[in-house]
Amino acid sequence: MREPSHFPTNRCWYRNFLHRHDTTADLPATDDLYLPGVIRATLRANDEAVLTIIVSNEEISSLPTHCEHLSHYCCEGIEWQHQFTENLLQPQRFFDDASGTTPTLQLRVLPLTTTPDPYEGGKEYLSLLLQASNHFLSQHRSPYTIQRTYSSSYMDVFASPDHYMTLLANYYGMDSTIRDILIALPGLLLVTGKYNEALSTLRGIALYFTDGVLPDRQPGPDLPLTDSDYGSVDTTLWYFYALDYYLRFTSNYDFLEEVLPHLKLCINRYVEGTYHGIRVDETDGLLSAHKPGKAMTWMNASIDGTPMTPRAGKPVEVNALWYHALSLMSEWLHYLSHRNVSRHDASFYQELLTQCKDSFQRRFWYAAGHYLYDVIDGPEGDDPAIRPNQLFALSLSHPVLDIEYGQQVFETVTKHLLTPYGLRTLSPREIQYRGRGGTYREQQLALHQGCVWPWLIGPYFDTLMRMWPQPLERQDTHLFREHLWRKGLQMLQPFQQRFQAMLLGTCEGILEGDEPNEPLSQHQFLASATSIGELLRSYTTLAQLCVPAMEAGIIGIR
């Protein structure tokens, strides 16, 4: 006979509860914990008994608590996730507002396991990625319902719902860092076919444009935006990146016209000068940012208000993103002029991007090391530290670096920075390198001085894909395609271990730079949207590569 479950409500407090993990990280380590009761139930092997726990702030009487209903909803959820995966494995059609003929995205299961059936393991890998992608969707309150401490010139362009769908930068920290959201968006929302959610996210973020610049974060009910939140040079440029992906998937150019005033104003303000010393240097067309005591790139860790990696001057990835944004503006305006009766002049952007590229080739190439400077024209001159930021000069859809330099950059990054779980933020040969973090302060020091960030596997993967077609003298293109495909599989395979360790079914945002690359203990870097998003996007890129090759019989499984 099955024993009933019990919930004795002993209701007791545990005072000064000690979190030993936080103690080692120099974080607040004591807390008062309330225990309402203990659930006791007996589940035996080979028994069909199910233990269901409902936690809700609604009246229990209003919830469907009958066993039959609960079992139905559980099975329904499992079936929805299964069907979600199966639907994405069918040919996906992009939208097209002109000819009606749409390109096809074919997401295939990759053989990412050593079991007798490699595709079964690959399907489990993909399913875990897709399940993890759903964790980061969230509803965000519109700025119309949040007190604002600034004004915007184009607020009337948008509708004013109370809430809109957006992404969380990480699950446990519940952060709304806009840069991370924009980086993760292509993988989390577009690869997974969530086009409406992608539009809602981009439209919602656009609400926070002020004078052509985006803030570092989205506001909260008790955290309105202030001028200090407009403190990064690259976040606004990542908006161009995410929007480009959205347009390639949907061809929704009506939305492009909707946000075009913001994009134009952004370019103008960057050229003229805006927040925190962000300005284009008119002598070389490169983008500079410098404010004492402030880190303005994605490497923005600080201790007691002091930035650990300030990178003042002209950072390499910022100028790669700047060139990319200018190229997109020129491309988009040409398209809109062709599409509409009204004419858009792209010559201004063409002049800017031409000067930017010419200067980039000349100024950023570090001839002695055969790679790119990380920052030029900084307070202490040019910085030759080997960092992953140089990859963005090759990985973006409009690369600013000529391909003749690309192979040397790629080889340098591979040699010094590549690990099984992403890229280090600094080469171990550098004096400032820190491969481990113990206390909170030590972890902050290590974040961008050697720690591994899994999301950087995305730009590395893009660069790998961009390298392969270039050597036209290759005798066997098919053989090289298979080599590239297998190389991609080797890069994705180790992350399967991350789904089965510590955080089940997801991937951390940061790991130590030294082997065995353990994750950092700080909770705010767990379950990272950028990690999952870039893994999904890279998975899709590799799946697209294998489709024509498999259909032609070029790639097989040995």
Image (cartoon, rainbow, N blue to C red):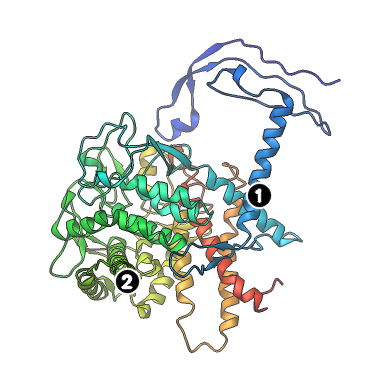
Q: Is residue 431 visible?
A: no
Of all residues shown, which one is farthest toward the right?
Answer: 1
Q: Quadrant of residue 97?
A: bottom left
Depicted 99 relative to depicted 445: above or below: below
Three-letter code for the amino acid on which mark 1 is drawn: Gln
Question: In the image shown, does 387 or 234 lie closer to the viewer?
Answer: 234
**Residue 538 percent across, percent down from the top left:** 51, 61
Q: Secondary structure at mark 1?
A: helix
Q: Nearer the viewer, residue 38 or 216?
A: 216
Q: Is residue 368 left or right of residue 64?
A: left
Give the answer, above or below, for where 398 lies relative to 112: below
Location of residue 212 with respect to 413 vertically, above or below: above
From what the image shows, is residue 514 above or below residue 25?
Answer: below
From this viewpoint, is residue 153 visible?
Answer: yes
Mark 1 highlights which residue?
A: 83
Chain-order first, disc 2 or disc 1: 1
Location of the C terminus (image quadrant): bottom right
Residue at image mark 2: 338
- Using a 10 Å C-alpha cutoff, classify the residue at mark 1 as few (fewer than 14 neighbours), some (14 to 19) or many (20 or more): few
Q: Amino acid at mark 2?
A: His
Callout 2 secondary element: helix
The N terminus sits in image quarter: top right
Give the image location of residue 107, x and y in percent: 59, 62
CA distance for labels 2 and 1: 40 Å
